[in-house]
Image (spheres, grey):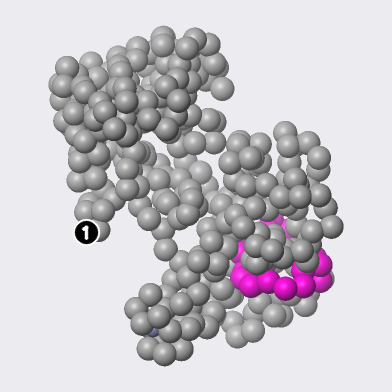
């Protein structure tokens, strides 16, 4: 599986500099990603070649500001989190404001990373204005990356909720276990996933979720890669595992309506878009886990999973 290297410099060392966001807002070279209600604007009419729209700070009137980092040219990139009803940058038609799901895999890796950072931080700026301990008002610090309670003094930071996602293979490695979620309309199959509960390890989450959703017990658990998914603030941690006994399979009948073993040929067809079974989209960690399993064995060489 490919490992994503960060292409964005988050410039965390600047966050402690007093008044840094105001100073960067005053610099002509600074660029701003505006987020409103989980959406951003794109540059260009063609979604296939979409890029995040970066505007000069002077174009934004009213917003909550934060520092996202610096781009490849060394320019500061700021976040302007707009109120849902804001019209300060709304000269363009409404349909040019898009959410993460609208982009799919069309953005460059760098823009995609920047988009997810911007949506995650904007979500926290919007949703967590009060101290979760005492309910007091807070002041923003560290260039938008922390809040300090004005009443009890406690400091708070943007959070992510860990969730596991697991690709399970048969003991001989020749088949992959996928489930159909009740919300997906019956044709779509994917890896098993669930949130880590309070005080639970990732390993325990994987075993619990797979028993609950598929009845299968696991061995040979190994971590693969992760994907932040700001809906509203998940961090998906991708694992591979081997089923102890492939005959144990049964769906939970509520969240998961069907659980099936797929051969490598069946997965290959589904990845090419042939046949009756749909798989998760190309931007998802679920698909990356499936592709990684599919490509691991001889015999699959030469097929194009995308
Ligand atoms: Zn407080």
Q: Is residue 73 left or right of residue 272?
A: right
Ligand 1 location (quadrant): bottom left
User: Is the C terminus in the top left, top right, bottom left or bottom right quadrant?
Assistant: top right
Tell me the residue at 50%/52% (across/down).
230
Q: Residue 75 at x, y = what percent?
A: 72, 64
Return the residue nearer the eye: 144 or 72.
Answer: 144
Write the start and end of the magenta stretch as one range: 56-75
Tell me the residue at 26%/48% (across/down).
202
Residues packed near mark 1 inside 10 Å, few (<14), some (14 to 19) or many (20 plus): few
Q: Residue 28 at x, y = what percent?
A: 82, 71
In the image, farthest residue toward the right: 91
- In this rendering, is residue 301 above or below 80? above
Magenta-drawn stretch contains 206 = no
Q: Is residue 7 left or right of residue 137?
A: right
User: Is the N terminus in the top left, top right, bottom left or bottom right quadrant?
Assistant: top left
Tell me the residue at 41%/50% (across/down).
235
Which residue in the protein does label 1 denote?
Answer: 199
- In this rendering, is residue 214 above or below 114? above
Label 1 SS: loop
Q: Residue 45 at x, y = what percent?
A: 81, 40
- In this rendering, is residue 29 above or below 5? below
Q: Is residue 136 left or right of residue 255?
A: right
Q: Residue 88 at x, y = what percent?
A: 78, 66
How many labels, in total?
1
């Amino acid at each position: 599986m490919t490992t994503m290297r960060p292409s964005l410099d988050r410039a965390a060392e600047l966050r402690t500099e007093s008044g840094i966001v105001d100073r960067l807002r005053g610099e002509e070279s600074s660029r701003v990603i505006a987020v409103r209600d989980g959406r951003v604007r794109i540059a260009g009419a063609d979604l296939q070649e979409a890029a995040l729209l970066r505007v000069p700070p002077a174009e934004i009137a009213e917003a909550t500001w934060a520092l996202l980092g610096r781009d490849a040219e060394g320019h500061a990139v700021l976040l302007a989190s707009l109120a849902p009803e804001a019209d300060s940058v709304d000269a363009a038609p409404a349909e040019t404001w898009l959410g993460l799901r609208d982009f799919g895999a069309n953005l460059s890796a760098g823009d995609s990373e920047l988009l997810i950072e911007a949506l995650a931080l904007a979500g926290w700026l919007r949703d967590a204005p009060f101290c979760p301990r005492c309910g007091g008002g807070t002041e923003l610090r560290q260039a938008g990356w922390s809040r300090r309670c004005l009443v009890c003094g406690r400091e708070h930071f943007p959070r992510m909720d860990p969730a596991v996602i697991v690709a399970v293979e048969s003991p001989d490695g020749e088949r992959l276990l996928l489930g159909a979620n009740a919300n997906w309309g019956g044709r779509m199959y994917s890896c098993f996933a669930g949130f880590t509960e309070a005080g639970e390890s990732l390993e325990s989450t994987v075993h619990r979720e797979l028993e609950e959703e598929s009845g299968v017990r696991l061995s040979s658990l190994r971590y693969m890669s992760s994907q932040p998914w700001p809906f509203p603030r998940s961090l998906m941690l991708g694992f591979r595992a081997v089923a102890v006994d492939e005959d144990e399979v049964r769906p939970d009948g509520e969240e998961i309506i069907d659980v099936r073993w797929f051969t490598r040929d069946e997965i290959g067809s589904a990845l090419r878009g042939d046949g009756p079974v749909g798989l998760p989209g190309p931007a998802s960690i679920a698909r990356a886990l499936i592709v990684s399993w599919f490509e691991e064995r001889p015999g699959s060489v030469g097929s194009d999973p995308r």
